[in-house]
Image: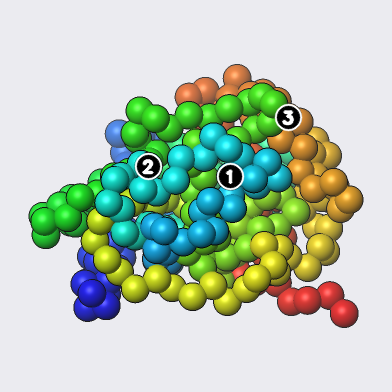
Amino acid sequence: MDEMKQALQQEVAHYAATAPGGAVGPETTDDPALQGMRYFTAPLFGFAAAEDPLFAVLRAPEAVGEQLILPQEWLPGAKTVISFFLPFSEQVRRSNLAQPDLPSPEWLYARIEGQAFLLEICRLIADWLQQRGFSALIPAVDPRMQVFHAPKFTSSWSERHAAYVAGLGTFGLSCGLITEQGMSGRFGSVITDAVFSPDQRPYDDPYAYCNHCGVCVRRCPVAAISLRAGKDHQICSDYLDQMKEHFQPRYGCGKCQSGVPCEKGIPQRIR
């Protein structure tokens, strides 16, 4: 299965680097500065056992919550959760430093069209597995996938928490997940009954990679993050709603993911 794991990762990496959907096309914009811009760099993968007890721990109120659907509930007979991270390209990341309170056009395209491309990759993984006789399910496009806004912001599946279980990274003050390639990017996952060897988590603390430097606190345009309380999801959500009105059909922000020490790697500890 390790050979199959390697083959799958190579297939996805090639697709991510070459598929037309991974870049801004002329049908989307006539801005020459944006055309041809690729949203992401090479993906990172993490594999978790579907029966990993940490998934059940995530049902605690202080984590995702009791509405979290477990891997074997999404897909009876599930054996593996395949999680992946697509880091934003340097052009996307650097562009978002230009204005302190508005997202860059590059970031908006990477957030919306880039997410559509991420789902293409999810479907590629599912098809790849099904062609080899395995079952596969994509939580993000399943009808049971729900997002809840009360009593707190949560969902029936969390890509970031799945990535945490799969050993890809730990959380920061902004609630993003810090991977070895930073937190500036997007996560996806596929659940399958194929058996892959699970990756080890090189951490026990869910905030092991965050050095609490406070840069994301200062970068947030609406003071939605604090060193003491972390992220206020309601303030963040209200601001994103404003961005959606301003930039329809796109929206985004990403200031807490760009121009910070954890933007493209694990930050150094503060001594």
For label 3, count other residues whose C-alpha is less than 10 Å away and answer few (under 14), some (14-19) or many (20+).
few
Q: Residue at x 52, y 45 (%)?
A: 158
Residue annotated with mark 3: 234
Residue annotated with mark 2: 73
Disc 1 marks which amino acid?
Arg
Residue annotated with mark 1: 59
For marks 1 and 2, give the CA distance. 13 Å
The quarter of the picture where the C terminus appears is: bottom right
Disc 2 marks which amino acid?
Glu
Disc 3 marks which amino acid?
Gln
Indicate the position of residue 22 as horizontal and vertical percent values: 34, 50
Indicate the position of residue 219 as horizontal and vertical percent values: 78, 49
Q: Earlier in the sequence, mark 1 or mark 2?
A: 1
Label number found at residue 25: none
Q: Earlier in the sequence, mark 3 or mark 1?
A: 1
For label 2, count other residues whose C-alpha is less than 10 Å away and answer few (under 14), some (14-19) or many (20+).
few
Indicate the position of residue 16 as horizontal and vertical percent values: 32, 58
Q: Residue at x 58, y 37 (%)?
A: 66
Count of numbered labels shown in the rendering: 3
Answer whether labels 3 and 1 touch (C-beta < 8 Å). no
Indicate the position of residue 208 as horizontal and vertical percent values: 70, 69
Q: Dividing the picture into quarters, in which one does residue 134 lie?
A: bottom left
SS at mark 1? loop
The image shows residue 6, relative to residue 249, as above or below, that is below
Answer whether labels 2 and 3 touch (C-beta < 8 Å). no
In the picture provided, is 265 more to the left or to the right than 167? right
The quarter of the picture where the N terminus appears is: bottom left
